Image (cartoon, rainbow, N blue to C red):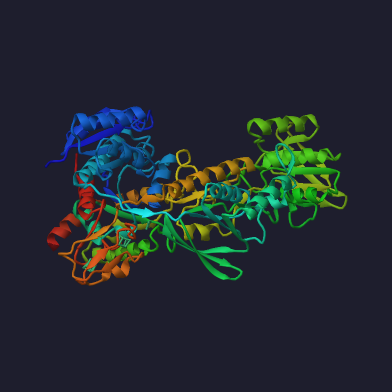
Amino acid sequence: MSEYEPKLVGFLCNWCSYAGADLAGVSRFQYPTNLRVIRVMCSGRVHPAHILEAFKDGADGVLVAGCHIPTDCHYISGNFKAQRRVAMVKKLMEQLGIEPERLRLEWISAAEGDKFAKTIREMTEDLKKLGPSPVAKVLKEAD
Amino acid sequence: MAPRIGVFICRCGINIAAYVDVPKVVEYAKTLPGVAYAEENMYTCSSDGLNKIKEAIKKHNLDRVVVASCTPRTHEPLFQATCEEAGVNKYLFEMANIRDQCSWVHMREPEKATKKAKDLIRMAVAKAALLEPDDEPEIDVIPSTLVIGGGVSGMRAALSVADQGFDVTIVEKEPALGGKLRGFDSLFPHKQKASEVLEPLIEKVTTHPRIRVLTESRLKSVYGFIGNFDIGVETGKGVETLKVGTIIVAVGAEVLKPRGLYLYGEDPRVVTQSELEQLLHTGSVNAEKIVMIQCSGSRSAERPYCSRICCNEAVKNALNVTEKGKEVYILYRDLQTYGIHYSRLEQEAKRKGIRFLKYQADKPPTITAEPNGLKVSVYSPTVNETVEVTANMLVLSTPLVPVSDAKELSQMLKVPLDSNGFFMEAHVKLRPIDFATDGIFVCGTAHSPKDIGESVAQALGVASRASIPMAKKRVRTAAIMSQVDQTRCSGCGTCIDVCPYNALRKNEKGLAETIAAVCKGCGVCGATCPEKAITMHHFTDEQIQAQGLAALEED
Ligand code: SF4
Ligand code: SF4
Ligand code: FES
């Protein structure tokens, strides 16, 4: 049997984290293939429903990545909004009995290709340890 | 009507094709819902590739286009323009990043990379199917430029912008214009006196009718966007506000003063290369035997970069002092006297008896202060023994480092710094003097260490880049913005509170509406509205969810 491969969805803001992911590529930093990226203009665009939806659709982990706080967000303060929402969703996940570690928020700048690659490596490892997500089941029961 | 999506998959030479099975991915793309046509290209962004997109749009009656290649951050505008030329609205275009975020980062896993490329294309196609055409709002561009920094780069950029008929304000933190060059004696490679370059330039700048110079002034705040920036400048007389259309960052760099390294700061006989310049400038170098150490504080763990100018500066200064009858040793790791002029200078230095001695990074020279001189011992890998020289003066070739307020400035301007702390361009090769943010540009040593010729070339470059939108008078801004569904909005005002740009207001019905020219499209309101009344153009909830769903589907 082939090894369990977690499915990871990443919401990356256009200005910092998406650029950081591109730099990882330009620098040829290798990381596991598990991530699927959805580009958004700002991490503040990510609605809690987008995250929950991804879990419901079968993601084992979700990454939200934006510009460093306090002042790097291209739109002044979207990153703070993301921070609040991710904390909220984590709490909700806990209540539903879903490991909150499956959701991660990272600040990754356009110059941090290494941090991007490292984040994906770590998340993939962590998710492998956690095993397949119980979310689909939990959410169905909650419906 | 069902969408007719065309998918163009780029091999990027071997960049993609060596790790992703492109023909297989093309076959797969053809099976995706909504895809009417798919093909592969050697280089989709070449004129050949672009023509093929246009031909396919006509021939297969395509109404949406997906290109799977590199990153939208550099190539989206090009492909969008191609779509428009063939009559497809630019907002009906989507990219899948199968190079920077796939083939280049999964070089050892071609099978999995191929699977990921398929998934990324499936996601892009899912979004493309839901895309809608959009019109871009046009805004006026204020015909005025802010130049931050009054060194050679800033002054040259300012002059060139002003000569094109636009107003320029230079903000300089020091009391006088001139930047680093003020402390220089002569300029390589022709040994011209620095003042001969600097004085006429300052004269031209200060007498130009379109240039205003604010010295002893600092940037306090930056708001707005291309065409309409609101700038706060702290001057001696308080805070002044400026309205400008474009911004040029020319803040230069600083010279590292490496306290503690090779007795610098502890023994007065140890100076930096730029302090030697100053001594030469004022005319007295009181030392018969001089040792220079290259890469002092650079190409190290802390500062991994080569500072580019120090080898040339050392060779030039060495030549200048040998002309005064001194003996000079240059201890180097790798001599980087690149290009036509500098390699000639190196030859000349060798002819004139300047001694070059290679040292190893892991065995740097050691310095002992003695009453009659500084004893320099260095292991030479060339002769495999330790060489000792007693010098009267030790000159450290230290790197240029970012200005101390680079971080603060970058945060105010919302532009990135690279890992060394220098201002980072949008793309090394394709947009070397632009920032990713429209209307803001960078030149000179603010960007990275470089010599004056290179800095001036960039300064003239940014002057031209910054003048384009001002010459056009109006620019189109992205149609990525919010729109309030009047039938769903309850008038709660939450979106108005969270918008960082005051781009929403209540209309006469008490409901929220977007002020199109002000909205920057961050999407914060869309992710906040409790009634789901806000649509984010080009990044709708439905599009994001469709991408997510497509990402998690099994192929
Ligand atoms: S948050 Fe939504 S419901 Fe409230 S005013 Fe804004 S658009 Fe209307
Ligand atoms: S998208 Fe951003 S800038 Fe535009 S109205 Fe919403 S919160 Fe304001
Ligand atoms: S733009 Fe990156 S977090 Fe807002």
Check the image and report above or below for B496 versus B54. below
Q: Is residue B378 left or right of residue B149?
A: right
Residue A125 placement (x, y as % from top left): 34, 49
**Image mark count:** 0
The relative height of residue B47 versus residue B128 in the rendered view (above or below) is: above
Residue depicted at 34% across the width and 42% down the height? B76
On the rendered structure, is A60 left or right of B393? left
Using the rendered view, name the quadrant where residue B376 is placed.
top right
Q: Quadrant of ligand 2?
A: bottom left
Q: Is residue B69 above or below residue B194?
A: above
Give the residue displayed 45% in from the left and 50% down from the top: B470
Q: Residue at x 33, y 56 (%)?
A: A64
Q: Which one is nearer the viewer's eye here, B382 or B487?
A: B487
Residue A133, position in %: x, y? Answer: 23, 54
In depth, the one of B544 and B249 nearer the eye is B249
Write the residue at 67% across / 58% down: B176
Direction right: furthest residue? B372
Residue B236 x, y percent position in the rendering: 61, 69
Which image quarter: residue B323?
Answer: top right
Q: In the rendering, at what x and y percent does residue B158 appear?
A: 57, 50
**Would you say residue B127 is visible in this rendering?**
yes
Q: Is residue B112 visible?
A: no
Q: Quadrant of the N terminus of chain A?
A: top left
